[in-house]
Image: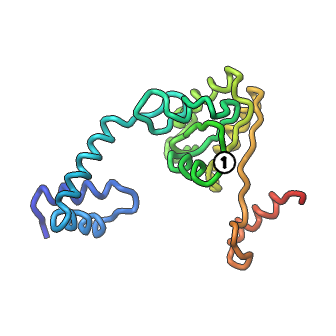
């Protein structure tokens, strides 16, 4: 069934979001038009403002409205320790769940040659410059526990070594509160190979 052109355009617009297919996009569009027109106006305004005002921090590549984000600008953060993450959502996870007080470098992805994502697309030339100036002493590699995340961590670890900085990788393994019988084989293998002395 064909809808009004403006409604079709709205449904297609929602489909750019991750995990949103045709049915979900239709449900969202119908909801806004049927019972949340004011909410839709707020959404449109907030989206427009965010797209216009939010860019990337020149130092860490995190989303920011200024050239330098609050974390990079803070004198209370340790500039010698840099946590390398794949996405802005990872920064939020580390900030909310740990006591990490260093700074970040956001890759905005991971190495994936098959998708045409190499070191240049991840800003690794910018990271190389930060390592070259000598301020960074440790890189904490907090990339995903995937083949691509591991390859990215390995590549960056080599980069750190060439510039005299140490590189550490976050631990992977059994989640807190997890029971061994429910843990997948890869996670359990990682937990055993990464065990440490008590």
* Secondary structure at numbered mark 1: loop
Q: Residues within 10 Å of mark 1 (few under 14, many from 20)?
A: few
Q: Which residue of the protein is positioned furthest toward the right in this rendering?
A: 197
Q: Residue 78 location, x and y as percent?
A: 67, 33
Query: Tag count in the figure?
Result: 1
Q: Residue at x 68, y 39 (%)?
A: 155
* Relative to 195, residue 155 above or below: above
In front: 175, or 10?
175
| 30 on left or right of 142 | left
Residue 175 lies, with reference to residue 156, above or below; the image says: below
Viewport quadrant of the N terminus = bottom left
Residue at 69 percent of width and 24 percent of height: 135
Q: How is the image coloured?
A: rainbow
Most distant residue in the front direction: 76
Looking at this view, is 24 or 146 the one in front?
24
Q: Which residue is mark 1?
A: 99
In the displayed structure image, the side of residue 18 where residue 198 appears, left or right? right
The reply, left or right, for residue 106 in relation to residue 156 is left
Where residue 21 appears, x then y in whole percent? 33, 65
Q: Quadrant of the C terminus?
A: bottom right
In the image, taking residue 59 as reference, residue 187 lies left or right, namely right
Q: Residue at x 21, y 56 (%)?
A: 40
Residue 50 is drawn in which quadrant? top left
Residue 49: x percent and y percent? 29, 40
């Amino acid at each position: 069934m064909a809808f009004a052109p403006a409604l079709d355009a709205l449904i297609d617009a929602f489909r750019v979001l991750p995990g949103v297919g045709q049915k979900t996009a239709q449900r969202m569009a119908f909801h806004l038009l049927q019972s949340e027109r004011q909410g839709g106006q707020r959404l449109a305004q907030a989206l427009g403002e965010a797209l216009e005002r939010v860019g990337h921090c020149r130092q860490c590549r995190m989303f920011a409205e200024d050239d330098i984000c609050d974390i990079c600008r803070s004198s209370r953060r340790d500039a010698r320790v840099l946590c390398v993450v794949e996405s802005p959502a990872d920064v939020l996870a580390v900030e909310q769940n740990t006591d990490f007080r260093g700074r970040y470098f956001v890759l905005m992805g991971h190495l994936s040659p098959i998708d045409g994502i190499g070191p240049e697309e991840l800003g690794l030339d910018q990271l190389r410059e930060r390592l070259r100036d000598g301020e960074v002493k440790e890189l904490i590699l907090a990339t995903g526990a995937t083949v691509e995340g591991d390859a990215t961590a390995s590549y960056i670890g080599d980069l750190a070594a060439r510039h005299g900085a140490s590189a550490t990788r976050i631990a992977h393994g059994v989640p807190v509160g997890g029971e061994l019988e429910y843990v997948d084989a890869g996670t359990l293998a990682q937990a055993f190979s990464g065990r440490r002395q008590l």
